[in-house]
Structure formats: structure tokens, C-alpha cells
């Protein structure tokens, strides 16, 4: 159980790091060559383009870090500030036409923003996964298996107070997604997910 969990953390962590590198590379190319084309069209030297791209990557990383710290992640288009919904304010056909044309611009901008944010978000998520691996500890596998069997036998929602001194095992089972956790009105409750996987 522990070795399977650790392997999955490593695999998903590595895939996330690859995804992060890809998103950062796409952001670099976009800002490097986009700023170069913009500077060239105004008749300026393009020598500053790499610096503009580097500043953009720093800004993206800081934005991603702030989102990660706040427990946020990717957003759907309808949740983003780029989504316009003038049609909801009235029945006028003009409002729906404005929505259509506005979203033709803001839709691709939203997709690009999510791709660029993928760099830091995948990076932080992957590092978090790699840190979550369980250390080798004698007897821990057996303790977790016993606890999971007890929870399965109970087959009901329970609290940490029902298992004094075994809070660590319950929290580790939660990290492994072997049990369901619910926090209602400040009370932590948990139960097993399925009848197998013990």
C-alpha cells in the first residue's frame, strides 16, 4: 500500500514537472517572440525581447505561487474575470451580440492564461506530491492495513475521538485517498470508501 502510493506520487510528480516545463516553454516562446514582433512593428530594437519574456515568466510564477498558497488552481472560463455575460442583464439581442464578439477575444486569452499558469501550478503541485511520499518505517504498512480494516468493519462515519492515539494512521490513510473525509461545522468525520483495497 505504501510503496504503491509512493510510486504513484513519483510518477505523477515527474509528469507534472514535464507539464510544467512545457507550459513554461510555451510562455517563453509566446512572450519572447510576441514582444519581439511588437517592438519590431513600432520600429524599436528587439534586443529587450528576452528580458520582457523573463519578466513575464517571473510575473507568471508569482501569480501561480499566490494562487497555490490560497488553495486555488485552474479556472473555468465562466469563473474568470475575462468572461462577459451582458446577456444575463437583459433580453436585448445587442447584449448577446456583444457577448459573442467579446468572448471571441477573451476566450483565447483565457486559454493562454491557463496554459501559462500551468507552469507554476504544475511545478508546485509536483513538488508537493514528491514531498508527500511516506518514509520507510518498520510496521507502518501493517498499522495502516489494520486501521483500514477497522474502519471498513465499522462501515459508518466516525470521528478522530473514536480512535485516540491513532490519529496519524487515519491522516495517512486520508492522504492515500483510502478513506473519505468530511469537515462539517468544524467536526472531522471519516469512513472507508469501498469494500476493497484493504
Image (cartoon, grey):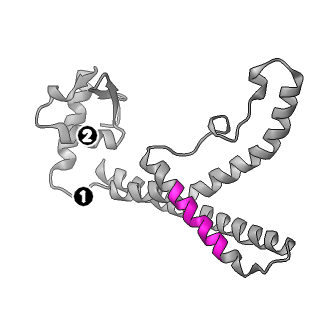
Position of residue 29 relative to residue 188, above or below, is: below
Residues rendered magenta in the picture: 51-63
Q: Name the residue under label 2.
A: 171
Say if the magenta span includes residue 62.
yes
Q: Residue furthest top?
A: 91
* Up/down of 151 relative to 141, above or below: above
| Identity of the residue drawn at 86% across and 71% down | 41
Residue 190: % across, % down: 29, 28
**Disc 1 crowd, CA 10 A, few/some/many (<14, 14-19, 20+):** few
Q: Is residue 72 visible?
A: yes
Instruction: Tell me the element at label 2.
Output: helix
> Can you identify the residue that label 1 sits on?
135
Q: Earlier in the sequence, mark 2 or mark 1?
A: 1
Q: Is residue 21 visible?
A: no
How far across and how far down the image is residue 58, in percent?
Answer: 55, 66
Quarter residue 159 falls in? top left
Magenta stretch prevailing secondary structure: helix
For image coordinates 70% across by 49% down, the residue present is 111
**Among the 4 quarters of the image, the one containing residue 37:** bottom right
Where residue 170 appears, x then y in whole percent?
23, 37
Left or right? Give the position of 1 relative to 35: left
Amino acid at each position: 500500500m505504501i510503496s504503491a502510493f509512493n510510486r504513484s506520487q513519483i510518477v505523477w510528480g515527474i509528469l507534472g514537472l514535464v507539464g510544467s516545463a512545457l507550459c513554461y516553454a510555451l510562455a517563453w516562446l509566446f512572450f519572447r517572440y510576441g514582444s519581439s514582433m511588437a517592438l519590431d512593428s513600432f520600429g524599436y530594437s528587439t534586443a529587450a525581447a528576452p528580458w520582457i519574456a523573463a519578466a513575464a515568466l517571473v510575473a507568471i510564477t508569482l501569480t501561480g505561487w499566490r494562487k497555490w498558497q490560497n488553495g486555488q488552481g485552474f479556472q473555468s472560463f465562466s469563473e474568470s474575470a475575462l468572461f462577459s455575460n451582458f446577456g444575463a442583464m437583459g433580453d436585448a439581442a445587442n447584449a448577446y451580440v456583444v457577448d459573442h464578439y467579446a468572448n471571441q477575444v477573451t476566450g483565447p486569452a483565457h486559454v493562454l492564461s491557463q496554459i501559462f499558469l500551468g507552469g507554476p501550478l504544475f511545478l508546485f503541485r509536483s513538488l508537493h506530491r514528491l514531498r508527500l511520499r511516506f518514509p520507510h518505517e518498520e510496521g507502518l504498512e501493517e498499522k495502516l492495513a489494520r486501521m483500514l480494516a477497522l474502519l471498513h468493519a465499522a462501515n459508518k462515519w466516525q470521528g478522530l475521538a473514536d480512535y485516540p492515539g491513532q490519529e496519524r494512521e487515519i491522516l495517512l490513510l486520508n492522504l492515500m485517498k483510502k478513506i473519505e473525509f468530511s469537515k462539517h461545522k468544524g467536526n472531522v468525520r471519516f469512513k472507508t470508501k469501498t469494500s476493497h483495497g484493504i
